[in-house]
Amino acid sequence: MADRLCLQGVLYVLHNDIAWQLLPLELGFGSGQTCWRRLDRWQRAGAFEQLHRVLLAELNAAGELDWSRACVDGSHIRAKKGEPTPARPRSTGGRRAASIT
């Protein structure tokens, strides 16, 4: 299956918010499972991060980005020096009785 067709299948699934299994074969994008596997491989290889950086650089060079309206959101990044992990809640389950023999 050609990468371009798989990418079109991925975009179709994401745009239409459907399950991978529901990607219609008659569209010619391959199976949903094939598209999902290819997407997973591309994500692990860092292809989309690289594409995002290239796109930002090209838009910035063309003067098409308005950085005065930029916003940073770190909600998806783990805070390494943030609050400590809360203590585990104590179990409310019963304990086995001590043996009296």
Image: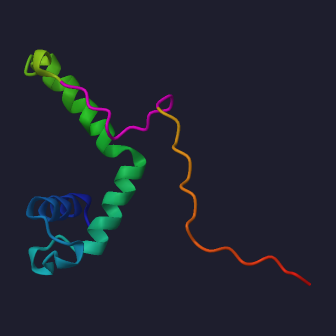
Q: Is residue 54 above or below residue 2?
A: above
- 32 vs 77, left or right, is left
State the predominant SS element of the stretch in magenta. loop
- Of 101 and 40, which appears nearest the observer? 101
| Figure colour scheme | rainbow
| Residue shown at the point (36%, 59%) measured from the top left | 40
Farthest right residue in view: 101
| Residue shown at the point (62%, 74%) measured from the top left | 94
Where residue 52 appears, x then y in whole percent?
Answer: 25, 36
* Quadrant occupied by the N terminus: bottom left
| Residue shown at the point (9%, 64%) measured from the top left | 16
Q: Quadrant of residue 31?
A: bottom left
- Of 14 and 56, which appears nearest the observer? 14
Where residue 13 appears, x then y in whole percent?
Answer: 16, 65
Where residue 101 appears, x then y in whole percent?
Answer: 92, 84
Taking the magenta stretch, the answer to whether it contains residue 13 is no
Where residue 39 appears, x then y in whole percent?
Answer: 31, 58
- 78 vs 50, left or right, is right
- Of 47 and 91, which appears nearest the observer? 91
Report the magenta residues as a range. Answer: 71-82
- Of 46 and 18, which appears nearest the observer? 18
How many numbered badges does the structure rendering display? Answer: 0
Q: Is residue 86 above or below residue 29?
A: above
Q: Quadrant of residue 72?
A: top left
- 55 vs 45, left or right, is left
Taking the magenta stretch, the answer to whether it contains residue 75 is yes
Q: Is residue 58 above or below residue 18?
A: above
Farthest front residue in view: 100
| Residue shown at the point (17%, 70%) measured from the top left | 29
